[in-house]
Image (tube, rainbow, N blue to C red):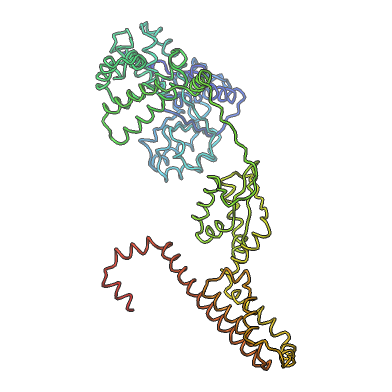
Amino acid sequence: MALALALKYRPTTFADLIGQESVAKTLSLALEKNRIAHAYLFSGLRGSGKTSSARIFARALQCEKAPINDPCNQCSNCLQSLENRHLDIIEMDAASSRKIDDIRNLIEQTKYAPSYGKYKIFIIDEVHMLTKEAFNALLKTLEEPPSAVKFILATTDPLKLPATILSRTQHFRFKKIPHKLIINHLENILMQENITYQKEALEIIARSGNGSLRDTLTLTDQAISYCNANITSSKITEMLGVVDPQILQNFFNAIEEKDNAKLKNILEIFEEYETEMILDEMILYLKENFHSNPNFSLLILERYLKILAESKNLLNFNCDGGFVLLLTSLKMQEAQKLSTINEEILKLEESLKTQPMPTIPTQRNTASPLTDSQTPTPLFQTLLDKIFDRDMNLGNVFKNNINFISFENNTLTWTSQATGQDKEILRAHYSIIKHIIQDIFGIHTKIVQTSISNEKSEKQASLQEQKTSPSLQTLDIQQNTASTTQQPKDTLTKINTQDSHTTKSPQIDIQKQNTNLQISPITQELPITQQKVILNAQQENTISLTQPKNPTTINQEINTQQEDITSQSTKQNTADVQNSFKQDFYVRNQELIDYMMRAIPIKDIRKFKND
């Protein structure tokens, strides 16, 4: 009766282990120097050699030639162990014997001395399947077993073991067997079995084994039977249900050649397989043929792998497999059209050589004296717009008082005629204005403020002060009244001492004095009605000077006139301010007012008005 390849070619010495050189070397040296621990834990992927290593290690401990780094496989102990009938090597499957009673029976056997060999060795396979109670029962014995008792535990999932078990054993981790070593091992076995094969077929078998040597040998057994002792890649793909590598090569060639008819036929073939498996095979094909295929550049490979990863994510949303493969092929065709950054740079350089860029003449701004017709640059207008967007009041103050001169060498030059309240507003918001200027003109822009002519500045300052302070409108009257009240006694004395024979009438003197009346510059800027009030007051004061009056009476009249003029000017300014406020309020809130007029019925508006 023929044995399975996995059993027939099971390792019998440490030298026969495939891909576990570090574990084999450590155990061999421990045996040779007689540094034997009381418990070992072997963990790793299925079919990586855990159980085989445990049997080899147990056989070496029972060998009559011990201490020896490898069992001789010739003595009676080794032969009995190879035939699985040694009395002192006890194997236990924890998946089927996992209860606390099974562990109690095992602990009971540790109390007896070995019957045939030097040690009583317990090999517990799939130890992670034991129950919690069984682990707890095993702890004490595992920590301090009798000197003749050795434990070898094997598991595929060491994370399920309690930390107390892990701390009481020497842990050996069996790694995944490399792909090349599996293929070499298959070639040696097929040569001994006189089986012909194609190396591409062995690649497919080894890849399907996923690093497990036992799974790979099982597939090889199946392939020998299916292929009738002649293993070929086409038959292996039919047996395993995977895509033939030649079909994948034709698929990528059709994408590069943009052969849509050929690509359509290949997509129809892909419908016979699982979509996820096809995508995995494409990734493996790209990985294996990256260096051998010159058409696969690094950029194209990166795009292909990204497209395949996105396609695998689509399968998680239960998308149709045929649609995913069609979308993948379309994306790969588009990926061929993209050019590299270096190619785009070369194209740009060539275009610049053939069509040089036109030179733009630079214009230097020269500072010129301020004139009334001077208009600001577009950047300065942008500055005004941004200040208005930030604060309407600040924008009005800035526009009325700041005049642009020039901008050159990162220096913005202007003149300012702000006084009083406007000056305080500009000073308080200087940081905001500077931030906006640096945002528009540049971060290194400097601001230079120059002064204008004295005559013009005085005139503009007087106009600004009249707008901000209503009390300045009575300045001329206060000056005239002050001049008349300085020497009332001298005036009366002159009037009383006049020559009685003079023929000049007081009326003539009044007319002369009226012709000499002058209006001050500040008064000229006032409305005509206020100018008439001031002239009438001056005339009355002049007439009163020709008649003798008491100083007290003169002062009372002057104070009364000042109060009347002040009250009139105050009322006029209050009315102007109210009108200005109404207009400004309507401009700012025009959109809100229009919305309310449309949204609120007329009846409600009347009700609000009455309230």
Q: Specify whether 82 is left or right of 595.
A: right
Q: In the picture, which quadrant includes the N terminus?
A: top left
Examine the image and state in which quarter residue 441 appears.
top right
Q: In the picture, which quadrant includes the C terminus?
A: bottom left
Evaluate whether residue 182 shows in this view.
no
Q: Nearer the viewer, residue 28 or 532?
A: 532
Q: Residue at x 55, y 71 (%)?
A: 526
Q: Residue 198's x, y, as percent?
A: 37, 8
The vertical placement of 194 against 160, above or below, is above
Q: Nearer the viewer, residue 551 or 29?
A: 551
The vertical placement of 34 against 474, above or below, is above
Q: Residue 301's x, y, as percent?
A: 43, 21
Q: Residue 70's x, y, as percent?
A: 54, 19
Q: Residue 156's x, y, as percent?
A: 43, 32
Q: Nearer the viewer, residue 430 or 423?
A: 423
Examine the image and state in which quarter residue 271 appears.
top left
Q: Residue at x 59, y 51 (%)?
A: 435
- The total of numbered circles placed on residues is 0
Q: Residue at x 49, y 27 (%)?
A: 174
Q: Nearer the viewer, residue 542 or 505?
A: 505
The vertical placement of 224 against 592, above or below, is above
